[in-house]
Amino acid sequence: MKTRIVTAILSLPLLIAPIYFGGIILYVMIFLLSVVGTYELLRAYKVKNKGIYAIVFISTLSYYLLLWFNWNNYLYLFITSFLLILLVYYVIAFPKLSFETVAITFVAFFYITYLISHIIWIRETKDYGFAFVWLVFLIGFGSDTFAYFAGRLFGKHKLAKELSPKKTIEGSIGGIFGAMLLCILYGYFMYKRGTLEDLSKLSWLIVMGGVGSILSQAGDLVASAIKRQTGIKDFGKILPGHGGILDRFDSNFFTAPFVYFIMTLFIN
C-alpha cells in the first residue's frame, strides 16, 4: 500500500500538467498511454509478431495526427484502412500469424486508443472542455476509492467472485454514491466559479457520477476478466504498486467517452 501511495503522489503531476496545459503535451501523454497500454494488452495475449507491433504503433501515431490536424473527416477512411492493412498482413504472414491475433489487435485499438482519446476530445471542447475533463478521473478514481472503503467497512456480498474476489456489492454501491457526491460538489464548484451557468444542469452531473461509476467498475472488471483469461496478475510493472497502464487507467477508458457524450449532448 505504501508503494502504491508513493507512486500515485509522484505520478500525479505527470497526469495533471498535460491535462491542465493541453495542446501537444496532452497529445503526447495520451499517445504514450495508448501505445504502452496496447503493448501490455497484446503481450498479455502472447502476441510476439513484430509486424503487428509496427502496424499498431504507426496506426496509433496516424490516428493522433489526424486528431491534431483536425482531420476528423478522414477517421472513417483511417478505420477502414487499419482493418484492411491488418487483414492483408494476415495473408502475408500466414500461417505464422493467426486470425485471432488480428482480431485481438483490432479490438485492442478501439478498447485502448479510441476510448482514451476521448480525453482529448473533451479537453478541446469549447466552453466546458477544461472543466469537464477532470470528471473523467474524478469519477474513475473517486468511485474506486469510495468502493474500496465501503467494501472494507460494509462488504459482505461478492460482486464478481470469479473475476475479482475482493469486490463486493456494498463496495460497488458505495462507489456509485461516492462518485455522485463528488460530481455534485464539483458541479456546485463550477457553478460558483461561473463555469456552469445553469444550476439545473447539476442533475446531469449526478447522472454522470452514478452511471459513470457503474461504467468505471465495468471497465475494471473487463481488465480483470482479461487478466484471468490470460493468467497474469498485472499488465505491467511501469507503475510500482499499481502494475501497468491498463491496471491504473482501466476505468478511465470507460468514463472518458461517457463524460464526452453527456457533455456534448446535454450540457454544452
Image (cartoon, helix red, strand yellow):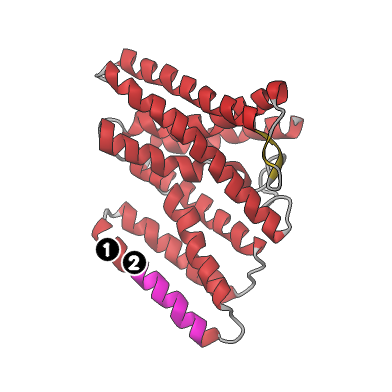
Against 73, residue 89 (above or below) is: below
Q: Quadrant of the C terminus?
A: top left
Question: Farthest residue in the top direction?
Answer: 192
Q: Quadrant of the N terminus?
A: top right
Quarter of the view holding residue 58: bottom left
Quarter of the view holding residue 72: bottom left
Q: Position of residue 61 (x, y in %)?
A: 43, 61
Q: Tag 1, which secondary structure?
A: helix
Q: Position of residue 93 (x, y in %)?
A: 55, 85
Task: Give the label on residue 78, or none.
Answer: 2
Q: Is 190 within the magenta?
A: no
Q: Is residue 134 visible?
A: no
Residue occupying image coordinates x 24% and y 60%: 73
Which residue matches tag 1? Answer: 74
Q: Is residue 161 left or right of residue 37?
A: right
Against 28, residue 77 (above or below) is: below
Residue occupying image coordinates x 49% and y 31%: 139
What is the crowding at mark 1: few (fewer than 14 residues within 10 Å), some, or many (at least 20)? Answer: few
Q: Is residue 268 left or right of residue 216?
A: left
In this view, the residue in front, 170 or 206, is 170
Q: Is the Cβ of the residue at disc 1 closer than 8 Å to that at disc 2? A: yes
Magenta region: 78-91
* Three-letter amino acid code of the residue under disc 2: Phe
Residue occupying image coordinates x 67% and y 35%: 7
Against 82, residue 210 (above or below) is: above
Task: Give the label on residue 230, or none.
Answer: none
In this view, the residue in front, 119 or 169, is 169
